[in-house]
Image (cartoon, rainbow, N blue to C red):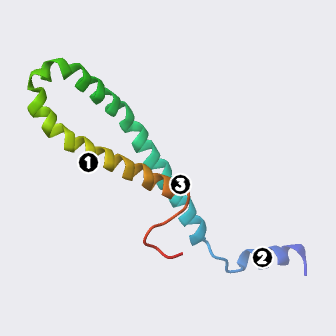
Amino acid sequence: MTPDDKLSLFLSLDRPVRDPAFEAAVARRVARRRALATVGASVPWAIAATALLWGLQPVVAPFGESLGLAIGPATGVLGLGLATAIGGLWLNARGMRLGRRA
């Protein structure tokens, strides 16, 4: 068998053109990178909103008691949501999946 015959035989073999496992791994990494970029992009907005609310605090101070009663439960709910989001990202980073069997 000549080298040209070997090369043509090698090139004519039917091999899978796509590797689904590799594509899934790349898609997962791209999705994680996009999610982190989205979270990173929202951080300056959160900082700006916090600074704005802190700056408005003296204006809102006369409504203190009534507003404080409304903000208290909302702060707890937002804190719980934040803790849940951080926990979910942490579990995802560690490779743990809730509700799925491996």
Residue at 32 percent of width and 49 percent of height:
80
* Crowd band around label 2 with a 10 angstrom C-alpha radius: few (<14), some (14–19), many (20+): few
Kind of residue at badge 3: Ala
Question: Residue type at mark 1?
Answer: Val
Residue shown at 19% from the left, 21% from the top = 56
- Distance between the alpha carbons at the discs numbered 2 and 3: 41 Å
- Residue 21 at x, y percent in the picture: 59, 70
Residue carrying label 2? 10
Task: State the mark number for residue 93.
Answer: 3
- Who's the residue at 43% across and 38% down the image? 40
Looking at marks 3 and 1 on the same chain, the residue that comes earlier in the sequence is marked by: 1
Q: CA distance from mark 1 to mark 2?
A: 63 Å
The reply to whether discs 2 and 3 touch (Cβ–Cβ < 8 Å) is no
Residue 83 percent across, percent down from the top left: 38, 48
Q: Which residue is labeled 1 in the image?
A: 77
Determine the CA span between mark 3 and mark 1. 24 Å
Q: Secondary structure at mark 2?
A: helix
Direction from residue 49 to residue 58 in the image, left or right: left
Q: Pointer 1: residues within 10 angstroms few (<14), some, or many (20+)? A: few
Say which element carries label 3: helix
> In the image, which is nearer the foreground, mark 2 or mark 3?
3
